[in-house]
């Protein structure tokens, strides 16, 4: 199927990427921070994958290769976006950023939603060089070494950037996830 896709068979390409579309979307959504930019980045990633498929040598799993294509598309979009004003983070909540709860009480659901919005706002305040590694590590579950490869950084640099990002986040939240100016948070301190 891969050879057929590399030879220009669009149906073979679609069969290869369809099972991985959710992964591409998730990566783009977490890195871009809003639905519209995530959709653009995911579309760009798929286009890049199609155009660059002949360059795929099979040294890594296809899913890992496509993951890297998606991360690169997002990083390029983030670089272009630096000149634009930040998008509204309210769109994250509207896009379903809240993980579904079993059956929360209405008050719990509102508080949970507010905490998620606060966390998203705090993440958006982090510099890109700290936010991207933190999202890849804490949200996507990627190991330091892989993040380093994706970003072209040594694993030690990735660790220190994640550590600095956690410190900045802990300045904003107390142990219960409430906004705070001074209380440290242990939420993001647990390692993988």
Image (spheres, helix red, strand yellow):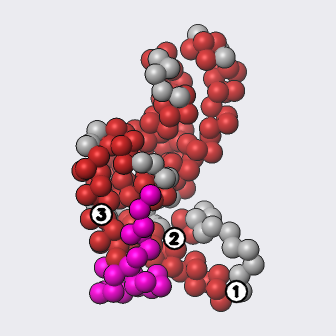
Residues under labels 2 and 3: Cα distance? 26 Å
Q: Which residue is mark 3?
A: 163
Residue 56 visible? The answer is no
> Which is more N-terminal, label 2 or label 1?
2
Which residue is labeled 2 in the image?
A: 90
In this rendering, does residue 54 appear at all? yes
**Which tag is nearer the camera, tag 2 or tag 3?**
3
Q: Which mark is residue 106?
A: 1
Front in this rendered view, residue 191 or 150: 191
Image coords of residue 161 (percent x, y): 27, 57
Q: Is residue 43 left or right of residue 1?
A: left
Q: Residue at x 51, y 70 (%)?
A: 90
* Mark toward the viewer: 1 or 2: 1
Q: Is residue 23 left or right of residue 170?
A: right
Relative to 148, does residue 117 appear above or below in the rendering? below
Quadrant that contains the N terminus: top right
Q: Secondary structure at mark 2?
A: helix
Q: Residue at x 48, y 43 (%)?
A: 41
Check if residue 150 falls in the magenta segment: no
- Helix, strand or loop at mark 3: helix
């Amino acid at each position: 199927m891969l050879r057929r896709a590399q030879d220009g068979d669009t149906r073979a390409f679609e069969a290869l990427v369809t099972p991985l579309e959710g992964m591409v979307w998730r990566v783009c959504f977490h890195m871009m921070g809003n639905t519209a930019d995530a959709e653009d980045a995911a579309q760009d990633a798929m286009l890049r994958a199609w155009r660059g498929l002949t360059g795929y040598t099979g040294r890594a799993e296809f899913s890992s290769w496509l993951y890297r294509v998606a991360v690169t598309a997002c990083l390029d979009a983030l670089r272009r976006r630096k000149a634009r004003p930040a998008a509204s983070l309210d769109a994250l909540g509207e896009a379903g950023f809240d993980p579904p709860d079993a059956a929360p009480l209405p008050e719990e659901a509102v508080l949970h939603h507010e905490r998620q919005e606060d966390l998203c706002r705090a993440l958006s305040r982090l510099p890109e060089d700290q936010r991207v590694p933190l999202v890849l590590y804490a949200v996507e579950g990627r190991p330091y070494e892989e993040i380093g490869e994706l970003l072209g950084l040594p694993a030690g640099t990735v660790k220190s950037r994640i550590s600095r990002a956690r410190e900045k986040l802990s300045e904003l939240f107390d142990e219960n996830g409430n906004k705070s100016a001074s209380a440290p948070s242990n939420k993001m301190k647990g390692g993988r």
